[in-house]
Image (cartoon, rainbow, N blue to C red):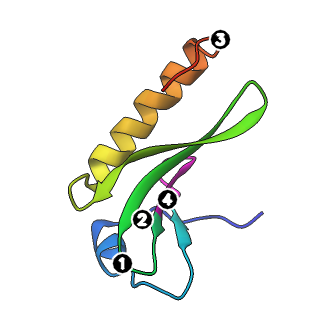
Amino acid sequence: MRRVLPLTDANVRNLRPKEKVYRAFDGGCGGLYVEVSPLGTKSWRFRHTLNGKARHKSLGQYPLVGLRMARDLANDYRLRVKCYSWVILS
């Protein structure tokens, strides 16, 4: 298994658009990644499982939501999913 290094604000700022959507994962917070669209939009997403199915939660767009806030939101959401997995979270 390959180790993913934690993202820095400079790493996220310097991500450039490509022909297809791609993801840059954050090694500092499991499941958190930034999705870069061909138009250059950078969106924070959090991947988790709920009832055995993979789910992706949008956390906001960069730079409106910075790296620290995205990590805080992902950790908060992870705790909510773990504690209340029987509740459907929106």
Q: Secondary structure at mark 3?
A: loop
- Secondary structure of the residue carrying tag 1 is loop
| Quadrant of the snapshot with the N terminus | bottom right
Rounded to the nearest whole Å, what is the CA distance between mark 3 and mark 2?
Answer: 32 Å
**How many numbered markers are drawn?**
4
Which badge, 4 or 3, is on the more N-terminal residue?
Answer: 4
The circle on residue 40 is 1
Give amino acid for label 3. Answer: Trp
Compare marks 3 and 2 and give the one earlier in the sequence: 2
Secondary structure beneath label 4: loop
Q: Earlier in the sequence, mark 2 or mark 1?
A: 2
Marks 3 and 1 sit apart, C-alpha to C-alpha, by 36 Å
* Residue where numbered disc 3 is placed: 86
Q: Position of residue 21 (x, y in %)?
A: 54, 74
Task: Give the quarter of the image for residue 84.
Answer: top right
Residue at the spot x=34%, y=38% of the render? 72
CA–CA distance in space, label 4 to label 1: 18 Å
Considering the numbered disc 2 on the image, is that residue within a helix, a strand or a loop?
A: loop
Work out which residue is located at the far bottom of the displayed protein and give it.
19
Kind of residue at disc 2: Leu
Could you tell me the amino acid type at mark 1? Answer: Gly
Mark 2 and 1 residues: CB-CB less than 8 Å, in contact? Answer: no
Q: Which residue is mark 2?
A: 7
Magenta residues span 27-34
In the rendered structure, are the residues bearing label 2 and label 4 in contact, judged by CB atoms less than 8 Å apart?
yes
